[in-house]
Amino acid sequence: MRKIPQRNAVIRGLRQRQIVTVLLLFGGYASLYFCRADLSVATPMLVEELGKRGLSHDDVIVGIGAISSLGVLAYALGKLFLTGLGDFWGGRINFLIGLAGAMAFTLLFASGVGLPLFTMAWIGNRLTQSVAWAGLVKVSSRWFDFSSYGSIIGILSVSYLVGDAAAREWMGALILRGYGWRSLFLLAAAVAGTMLVANYLFLRESRVRAGFSEAIPNPLNLFAASESRPANLKELLLPLLRSRAFLLVCFLSLGCTIIRETFNDWTPMYLRDYLGYSMSNAAGMSAIFPGVGAVSVLVSGWLSDRLGVNGRSLIMFVGLTCTAAALILLMSMHSSTTGTLVPLAAIGLIAFCLLGPYSYLGGAFALDFGGKQAGAVSSGLIDGVGYLGAVLGGYSVGKMSVAYGWQGVFVVLAAVSALTAFGAGWLYVLGTRAAAALVPPPEPLSAEAGLP
């Protein structure tokens, strides 16, 4: 009889430590988006300041677009070549590196006075941040059973949307009170530094190291079920690269990330330049994209639990199709819509249709393929391929907006969304066929079985 109270105590202790782990990962990753939204929010102010130093408006726009693209390229390369280290030395180290690098390079950016130093600081910021999400995924795989992947990754995916929205709101409030662009970066560094200390002190690599039993991985993953270190990088990469479904998920990440990063980087500039919002209002209003996206992630997770594993592909197909339609609607709007809620509603609709499905690509899908052994490299490859495409969201979008206007930008994004929706439909068909192949056909009935 004593074993039952002891077992209940162990379960309660595990649940409490899991809650603490989620809170630390959630807060830490949300803080990273303070160190990512700051450039987007500060862009109109940087354009104004650099313009006073003799640079033209268009040259500064293209220059900041180049900074953004180089940062995304560094982020993509880090995802592809550095995140897999978490499968060898642990996800906690990856996560702490991301927080420390974000804080340090954000402070370096705040000390800068020109585009060269801004560029170096932003590249360093994005490169070190690139390992953090894979670290989060790795730690999650060692704290939670596979039956909780969808809900846990869904909750943690909300972190970057909440962090992005909160950063834009707080930074908009600072601008409204007369603070300059440097204060935005100092705020971001302070938030990241606070979460760095908290995670260093309290985050543990796995529940085994905290004295509990091992987490149970998805039995259909491509790797072993243990938490043992893989023998070499080849053992991690080959099973993933041989999987047609995994490669298709990487393609979906490519299309979704192009659209997402474009809105993350350029929404304040679009609201300021094209629709005529003030700098503070443009910063605050740009929070609608990550804010509505947070709701989308939760709704998509709830639907995914009820539609089954293959339901994620169906949700992506519907969401991306609606995203393409919303982008066409945004394309048709003119600057005369300033002061109305129509452009903001269209941006919110895009966020709702896109960000929920997107959030599972480098999270739940990555763990389904990689399990506990290769969760970091699986997540890194999916996200890395996506961010290689998102390089276009900086420099190319800046050039395109100058040459063809924002309508031209939205035409291209609508085409990307439609093509990605086709890929999601294909993934759904493949998943349906695979599921059907696992169900044996019914045995034919005969007269001996009781037919007349």
Image: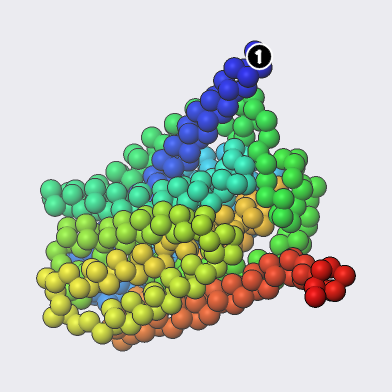
What residue is rendered at 39% in x and 44% in y?
31
What residue is rendered at 17% in x and 80% in y?
335
Q: Nearer the viewer, residue 51 or 123?
A: 123
Q: Is residue 344 left or right of residue 1?
A: left
Residue 118 appears in view: no
Q: Nearer the viewer, residue 145 or 311?
A: 311
Circle 1 crowding by C-alpha within 10 Å: few under 14, some 14–19, many from 20: few
Find the residue positioned furthest to the top.
2
Task: Give the percent coordinates (x, y) of residue 314.
Answer: 52, 69
Task: Give the percent coordinates (x, y) of residue 386.
Answer: 53, 67
What residue is rendered at 22% in x and 61% in y?
285
| Residue 61, placed above or below residue 118 | below
Find the residue positioned furthest to the right.
448
Picture quarter with the C terminus? bottom right
Amino acid type, mark 1: Met
Task: Give the percent coordinates (x, y) of residue 145.
Answer: 62, 42
Q: Secondary structure at mark 1?
A: loop
Residue 433 appears in view: yes
Picture quarter with the N terminus? top right
Q: Is residue 135 left or right of residue 272?
A: right
What residue is rendered at 17% in x and 60% in y?
281
Task: Give the percent coordinates (x, y) of residue 238.
Answer: 76, 62
The residue beneath circle 1 is: 1
